[in-house]
Amino acid sequence: MGKILTFYYVWYGVPWGPAKKWMGWNAVGYNPDIIIEGKRHIATADYPLDGVYDSLSIETLNRHIMQMNFAGIDGVILSWWGFNHYSNRVLETLLEVCPKDFTTIYYETAMTLKLKEKDRKTAINKIIDDLGKILRKYATKDGWIKLDGKPLLVIYIADQYTVNEWSIIRTTLEDKGYSFFLLGDTFNLEYLKVFDGLHTYNPIKITRKAQDYKEIYSSIGEKIRKRNKLFAATVCPGYDDRKIRRPGIYIPRQDGKYYHEAWIAALKSNADMMLITSWNEWLEGTEIEPSLQYEYKYLYITKDYVKIFKDRSIL
């Protein structure tokens, strides 16, 4: 497979952009209209090098595509929250401007949880309807990522639903004539009965030490490959959500050391695919998008490791 994909967040808006209002940057009561020492008062640990932006802006999308291309990133897994959400408008626009084989969605199961608490069957039917419409309306476009010739769908927190429930979802969609490659966010190997591959969104859920990834990834990767399924290893530069949560979690970047260790561990696992958390989850401080604090540092680090991943003979 050999792809490098990054998780992409598109919930940002500015009053002078398509959103016509503040979105994302103003989380948990921050006020971006306040400017202190040249920087807006925003809910992020770091500050975007290019300033605050609107996710639906063509200028923003083109800049991100260009920067990702520089770093060797093949495409994005776009955090998707429904057809009436801003993320769907961005998805539609991105598919019009992105390169071939560049975009897929991260189906956010979190949006179904309240419905699931009331009626699991209704929640399952919603997932079936959502994924069916995605496959019909968007996944046929040239910009959609294909694996093994099939449209890629990526599911966040797959184990919010049981293996049997996912089997119902998949079988129902396939009976309707849809073919797709399903990548799930879980390391529970039972889900390989339904999913074509597994990953974890954020490795800090497993361990807060990047050097520990090596043993975890090598072990899980071997087990997944023995079942002839895909293993996608996730790398992350650090984590800091203390501006939006109390007490929050802080995993220092250590001047890039954490990111280096994560990449080395992921590469040693012989993963089929690499995922980067994240391009721009600024609220949790996992972004590799250029910032005032780090400038282009994390794009250059990414570029170096992408070269290694693309040419396994270097290892």
Image (spheres, rainbow, N blue to C red):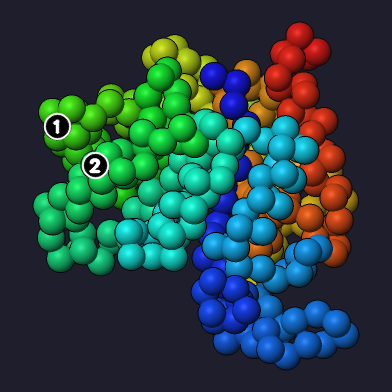
Q: Write down the residue under mark 1.
A: 176
Where is residue 62 drawn, in percent x and y? 66, 50
Q: Amino acid at mark 1?
A: Lys
Q: Nearer the viewer, residue 216 or 84?
A: 84
Q: Secondary structure at mark 1?
A: loop
State which quadrant residue 82 falls in. Answer: bottom left
Earlier-in-chain disc, 1 versus 2: 2
Q: Residues within 10 Å of mark 1 (few under 14, many from 20)?
A: few
Residue 192 in sight here: yes
Disc on res. 108: none
Q: If the image is split into quadrants, where does the N terminus sit?
A: top right
Residue placed most toward the observer, 132 or 254: 132
- The residue at 70%/71% (across/down) is 52
Comparing 108 with 219, the one in front is 108
- Which image quarter: residue 116? bottom left
Report the residue marked by disc 2.
Answer: 132
Q: Residue at x 67, y 59 (%)?
A: 59
Residue 275: % across, % down = 59, 37
In 3D space, how far apart are the residues under numbered discs 1 and 2 (Cα atoms)? 9 Å
| Residue drawn 52% across the image and 49% down it | 94
Q: Measured from the top left, where is residue 284 in percent x and y?
A: 62, 62
* Residue 294 placement, left or right of 200: right
Whole-percent x and y of residue 22? 57, 80
SS of the residue at dot 2? Answer: helix
